[in-house]
Amino acid sequence: MLPIELFKALSDLTRLQCLLLIQQEQELCVCELMAALDLSQPKISRHLALLREADLLAAERRGQWIYYRLSPVLEDWILTILEQASLQHDLTELSHRLTIMGDRPERQSQCC
């Protein structure tokens, strides 16, 4: 990925917040991002599609839910930029909305 492509993807606040929340939580589904960002499903889904097209996110379907996580093939310089962005961006309110969300999908416990 070229730096200009990354900066283009991160230039929208909603996409940046989606990425930072997913980075913080390790994985989230659309309904969780809707609750955290207080945005509609089509808006969140469109931003996630753009992030997937930019190869920043990976998606996995589990039953009725699609979970999004950072792409496992992100280069170190991209991860460094996301880490720095997370230090500069306060996610407290968004994390609080996520915490108090009702009907949050349950994660399947991982077996060793």
Image: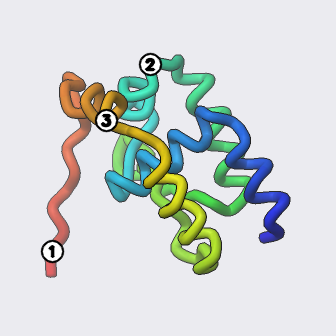
Tag 2 residue: 38
Relative depth, front residue between 104 and 77: 77
Query: Does 60 sit above or below residue 18?
Result: below
- Depth check, mark 1 against mark 2: the one in front is 2
Q: Earlier in the sequence, mark 1 or mark 3?
A: 3
- Residue 21 in percent (x, y) is at 42, 46
Counting the numbered discs, the total is 3
Query: Crowdedness of circle 3 by 10 Å Cα count: few (<14), some, many (20+)?
Result: few
Q: Position of residue 9 (x, y in %)?
A: 73, 48
Disc 3, SS:
helix
Point 83% across, 69% down: residue: 2
Instruction: Give residue 98's position: percent from left, percent from top.
Output: 28, 32
The residue that disc 1 covers is 111
Q: Indicate the position of residue 62 as horizontal and vertical percent values.
A: 36, 52
Task: Assess disc 1: are there few (<14), some (14-19) or many (≥20) residues with their C-alpha within 10 Å of its C-alpha.
Answer: few
Quadrant of the rendered image containing residue 94: top left
Q: Say which of 82 and 68 sits in front.
A: 82
Quadrant for the N terminus, please.
bottom right
Residue bearing mark 3 = 92
> Is the residue 4 above or below the residue 2 in the image?
above
Label 2: how many residues lie within 10 Å, few (<14), some (14-19) or many (20+)? few
Look at the numbered disc 1 and give the secondary structure of its residue.
loop
State how far apart marks 3 and 2 are (Cα): 14 Å
What's the residue type where badge 3 is placed?
Thr
Mark closest to the chain's N terminus, 1 or 2: 2
Secondary structure category for the residue under label 2:
loop
Three-letter residue code for mark 2:
Asp
* C-alpha span from label 1 to label 2: 33 Å
Q: CA distance from mark 1 to mark 3?
A: 31 Å
